[in-house]
Image (tube, helix red, strand yellow):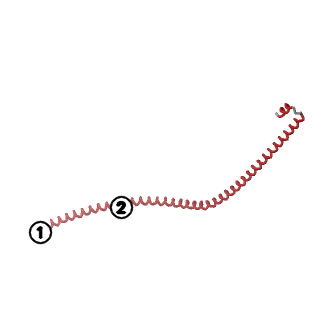
Amino acid sequence: MKNLANMGSGVSASGDENDDEDISKSAFASFQAREEEIEKMKMQVKEKVEMKLGQAEEQTRRLAQVWEELEVLTDPMRKEVASVRKKIDVANREVRSLGQSCQKKEKEYKEALDTFHQKNNEKNQLTATLVELVKESENVRMKKLEELSKNIDPSC
Protein backbone atom coordinates (compact mmCIF):
# COMPACT_ATOMS: atom_id res chain seq x y z
CA MET A 1 0.00 0.00 0.00
CA LYS A 2 2.86 2.30 0.72
CA ASN A 3 4.21 1.66 -2.76
CA LEU A 4 0.94 2.74 -4.24
CA ALA A 5 0.92 5.85 -2.12
CA ASN A 6 4.51 6.63 -3.11
CA MET A 7 3.83 6.12 -6.77
CA GLY A 8 0.93 8.40 -6.65
CA SER A 9 2.95 11.12 -4.94
CA GLY A 10 5.64 11.00 -7.61
CA VAL A 11 8.49 9.44 -5.62
CA SER A 12 11.24 7.85 -7.71
CA ALA A 13 11.96 4.10 -7.92
CA SER A 14 15.09 4.42 -5.86
CA GLY A 15 12.98 5.91 -3.09
CA ASP A 16 10.83 2.81 -3.22
CA GLU A 17 13.83 0.64 -2.74
CA ASN A 18 14.85 2.61 0.33
CA ASP A 19 11.34 2.33 1.68
CA ASP A 20 11.34 -1.40 1.01
CA GLU A 21 14.70 -1.70 2.68
CA ASP A 22 13.46 0.32 5.65
CA ILE A 23 10.35 -1.82 5.83
CA SER A 24 12.46 -4.98 5.66
CA LYS A 25 14.79 -3.67 8.36
CA SER A 26 11.81 -2.63 10.44
CA ALA A 27 10.10 -6.00 9.91
CA PHE A 28 13.35 -7.80 10.70
CA ALA A 29 13.84 -5.70 13.85
CA SER A 30 10.24 -6.33 14.83
CA PHE A 31 10.67 -10.03 14.12
CA GLN A 32 13.90 -10.09 16.12
CA ALA A 33 12.24 -8.24 19.02
CA ARG A 34 9.36 -10.73 19.00
CA GLU A 35 11.81 -13.63 18.85
CA GLU A 36 13.67 -12.18 21.83
CA GLU A 37 10.37 -11.68 23.66
CA ILE A 38 9.33 -15.25 22.85
CA GLU A 39 12.74 -16.55 24.00
CA LYS A 40 12.44 -14.48 27.19
CA MET A 41 8.95 -15.85 27.87
CA LYS A 42 10.20 -19.33 27.03
CA MET A 43 12.97 -18.95 29.61
CA GLN A 44 10.48 -17.65 32.19
CA VAL A 45 8.16 -20.60 31.56
CA LYS A 46 11.12 -22.97 31.71
CA GLU A 47 12.20 -21.46 35.05
CA LYS A 48 8.64 -21.78 36.39
CA VAL A 49 8.45 -25.41 35.22
CA GLU A 50 11.82 -26.18 36.82
CA MET A 51 10.69 -24.48 40.04
CA LYS A 52 7.42 -26.44 40.00
CA LEU A 53 9.32 -29.68 39.29
CA GLY A 54 11.62 -28.94 42.23
CA GLN A 55 8.58 -28.34 44.44
CA ALA A 56 6.96 -31.53 43.16
CA GLU A 57 10.13 -33.52 43.86
CA GLU A 58 10.30 -32.05 47.36
CA GLN A 59 6.63 -32.90 47.93
CA THR A 60 7.28 -36.41 46.61
CA ARG A 61 10.17 -36.83 49.05
CA ARG A 62 8.05 -35.55 51.94
CA LEU A 63 5.15 -37.80 50.99
CA ALA A 64 7.48 -40.79 50.73
CA GLN A 65 8.85 -39.98 54.19
CA VAL A 66 5.34 -39.65 55.61
CA TRP A 67 4.39 -42.94 53.92
CA GLU A 68 7.37 -44.69 55.50
CA GLU A 69 6.47 -43.30 58.91
CA LEU A 70 2.88 -44.41 58.38
CA GLU A 71 4.04 -47.93 57.48
CA VAL A 72 6.15 -48.05 60.63
CA LEU A 73 3.17 -46.92 62.68
CA THR A 74 0.70 -49.36 61.19
CA ASP A 75 3.00 -52.39 61.16
CA PRO A 76 3.08 -52.93 64.97
CA MET A 77 -0.64 -52.25 65.11
CA ARG A 78 -1.24 -54.86 62.43
CA LYS A 79 0.73 -57.41 64.38
CA GLU A 80 -1.17 -56.62 67.57
CA VAL A 81 -4.51 -56.71 65.76
CA ALA A 82 -3.62 -60.02 64.11
CA SER A 83 -2.54 -61.44 67.47
CA VAL A 84 -5.76 -60.33 69.15
CA ARG A 85 -7.83 -61.72 66.27
CA LYS A 86 -6.10 -65.08 66.60
CA LYS A 87 -6.80 -65.09 70.34
CA ILE A 88 -10.44 -64.21 69.64
CA ASP A 89 -10.67 -67.07 67.13
CA VAL A 90 -9.20 -69.52 69.69
CA ALA A 91 -11.52 -68.21 72.41
CA ASN A 92 -14.47 -68.43 70.01
CA ARG A 93 -13.68 -72.08 69.23
CA GLU A 94 -13.35 -72.83 72.96
CA VAL A 95 -16.61 -71.02 73.73
CA ARG A 96 -18.38 -72.92 70.94
CA SER A 97 -17.00 -76.23 72.25
CA LEU A 98 -17.90 -75.36 75.84
CA GLY A 99 -21.35 -74.19 74.72
CA GLN A 100 -21.96 -77.53 73.01
CA SER A 101 -20.71 -79.34 76.10
CA CYS A 102 -23.00 -77.24 78.31
CA GLN A 103 -25.97 -77.95 76.06
CA LYS A 104 -25.21 -81.67 76.13
CA LYS A 105 -24.80 -81.69 79.91
CA GLU A 106 -27.88 -79.51 80.32
CA LYS A 107 -29.86 -82.00 78.23
CA GLU A 108 -28.45 -84.89 80.30
CA TYR A 109 -29.30 -82.96 83.49
CA LYS A 110 -32.89 -82.39 82.32
CA GLU A 111 -33.24 -86.07 81.40
CA ALA A 112 -31.80 -87.11 84.77
CA LEU A 113 -34.08 -84.61 86.55
CA ASP A 114 -37.11 -85.94 84.66
CA THR A 115 -36.10 -89.50 85.51
CA PHE A 116 -35.59 -88.45 89.14
CA HIS A 117 -39.04 -86.86 89.28
CA GLN A 118 -40.63 -89.92 87.66
CA LYS A 119 -38.93 -92.29 90.08
CA ASN A 120 -39.75 -90.01 93.01
CA ASN A 121 -43.42 -89.93 91.95
CA GLU A 122 -43.35 -93.71 91.54
CA LYS A 123 -41.81 -94.07 95.02
CA ASN A 124 -44.44 -91.72 96.49
CA GLN A 125 -47.21 -93.74 94.85
CA LEU A 126 -45.70 -96.97 96.12
CA THR A 127 -45.31 -95.44 99.57
CA ALA A 128 -48.95 -94.34 99.49
CA THR A 129 -49.96 -97.84 98.35
CA LEU A 130 -47.84 -99.35 101.14
CA VAL A 131 -49.45 -97.07 103.72
CA GLU A 132 -52.90 -98.11 102.45
CA LEU A 133 -51.92 -101.77 102.54
CA VAL A 134 -50.44 -101.44 106.03
CA LYS A 135 -53.60 -99.68 107.25
CA GLU A 136 -55.77 -102.28 105.63
CA SER A 137 -53.64 -105.05 107.07
CA GLU A 138 -53.84 -103.45 110.51
CA ASN A 139 -57.61 -103.12 110.19
CA VAL A 140 -57.91 -106.73 109.10
CA ARG A 141 -55.64 -107.85 111.93
CA MET A 142 -57.59 -105.73 114.41
CA LYS A 143 -60.85 -107.26 113.28
CA LYS A 144 -59.32 -110.70 113.54
CA LEU A 145 -57.99 -109.92 116.99
CA GLU A 146 -61.36 -108.62 118.06
CA GLU A 147 -63.01 -111.73 116.72
CA LEU A 148 -60.47 -113.90 118.46
CA SER A 149 -60.93 -111.89 121.55
CA LYS A 150 -64.70 -112.33 121.35
CA ASN A 151 -64.23 -116.02 120.79
CA ILE A 152 -62.08 -116.31 123.83
CA ASP A 153 -64.31 -114.27 126.01
CA PRO A 154 -67.81 -114.35 124.62
CA SER A 155 -69.08 -111.96 127.31
CA CYS A 156 -67.19 -108.88 126.05
Residue type beneath disc 2: Phe
Residue 64 against residue 11 in the figure, above or below: below
- Judged left or right of residue 18, residue 57 is left
Numbered tag placed on residue 97 in the rendering: none
Residue at point 44% right, 60% down?
102
CA separation in Å, label 2 and label 1:
53 Å
Viewport quadrant of the N terminus? top right
Numbered tag placed on residue 153 in the rendering: 1
Residue type beneath disc 1: Asp
Of helix, strand and loop, which one carries label 1? loop
* Snapshot quadrant of residue 120: bottom left
The one nearer the camera, 23 or 75, is: 23
* 2 vs 1, front mark: 2
User: Neighbour class for label 2 at 10 Å: few (<14), some, many (≥20)?
Assistant: few
Residue at point 83% right, 34% down?
2
Q: Position of residue 78 (x, y in %)?
A: 59, 59
The one nearer the camera, 34 or 120, is: 34
Viewport quadrant of the C terminus? bottom left
Q: Position of residue 95 (x, y in %)?
A: 49, 60
- Judged left or right of residue 18, residue 114 is left
Return the residue at label 2: 116
Of helix, strand and loop, which one carries label 2? helix
The extreme top residue here reads 8
* Snapshot quadrant of residue 133: bottom left
Q: Position of residue 50 (x, y in %)?
A: 74, 52
Q: Position of residue 89 (x, y in %)?
A: 53, 59
